[in-house]
Image (cartoon, rainbow, N blue to C red):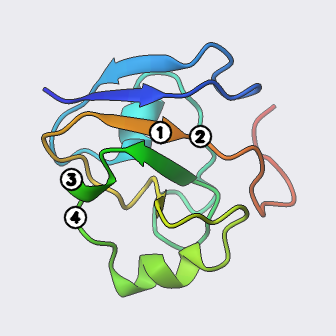
């Protein structure tokens, strides 16, 4: 079972976390299942960029992004070559290291 290491994020995951994930599960679903509350304003429908993550290790083990995801990624804050939308990137069999960007383009966070 692959492991995902979420690097520390001062608000969402201050200490970082290492979680087990199921192959085929999205990076976002694995995070949410483990109480790592990455924003997902469009409810995982690939219609925003609030779940933007940067895959620091294991990027090549992910399926290629589809055109709709690529179009939305172009609008993400802090876009990097290894950027993915957490709701769309499905985990393969390799371990991943994930950075959650400091900001999103979402003007209002729904978290309290």
Question: In the image as oriented, which residue stretches furthest toward the top?
Answer: 15
Q: Does residue 86 sit above or below 45 in this rendering?
A: above
Q: Residues within 10 Å of mark 2 (few under 14, many from 20)?
A: many
Q: Which residue is mark 2?
A: 38
What distance separates the C-alpha of mark 1 from that of mark 4? 16 Å
Q: Nearer the viewer, residue 69 or 7?
A: 7
Which part of the image, by quadrant, shows the N terminus?
top left
Quadrant containing the C terminus is: top right
Q: Are marks 1 and 4 in contact (CB under 8 Å)?
A: no
N-terminal label among 2 and 1: 2
Q: Position of residue 9 (x, y in %)?
A: 68, 29
Q: Is residue 95 left or right of residue 73?
A: left
Q: Earlier in the sequence, mark 3 or mark 2?
A: 2
Name the front one of labels 3 and 2: 3
- Report which residue position mark 3 lands on: 61
Residue labelled with disc 1:
98
Give the residue displayed 34% in from the left and 73% down from the top. Answer: 65
């Amino acid at each position: 079972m692959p492991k995902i290491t979420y690097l520390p994020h001062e608000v969402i995951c201050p200490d970082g976390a290492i979680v087990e994930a199921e192959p085929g599960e999205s990076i976002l679903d694995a995070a949410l299942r483990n109480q790592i509350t990455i924003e997902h304003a469009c409810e995982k429908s690939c219609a925003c960029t609030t779940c933007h993550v940067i895959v620091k290790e294991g990027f090549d083990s992910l399926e290629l992004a589809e055109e709709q995801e690529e179009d939305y990624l172009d609008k993400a804050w802090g876009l990097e070559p290894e950027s993915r939308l957490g709701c769309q990137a499905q985990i393969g069999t390799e371990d991943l290291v994930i950075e959650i960007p400091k900001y999103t383009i979402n003007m209002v966070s729904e978290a309290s």
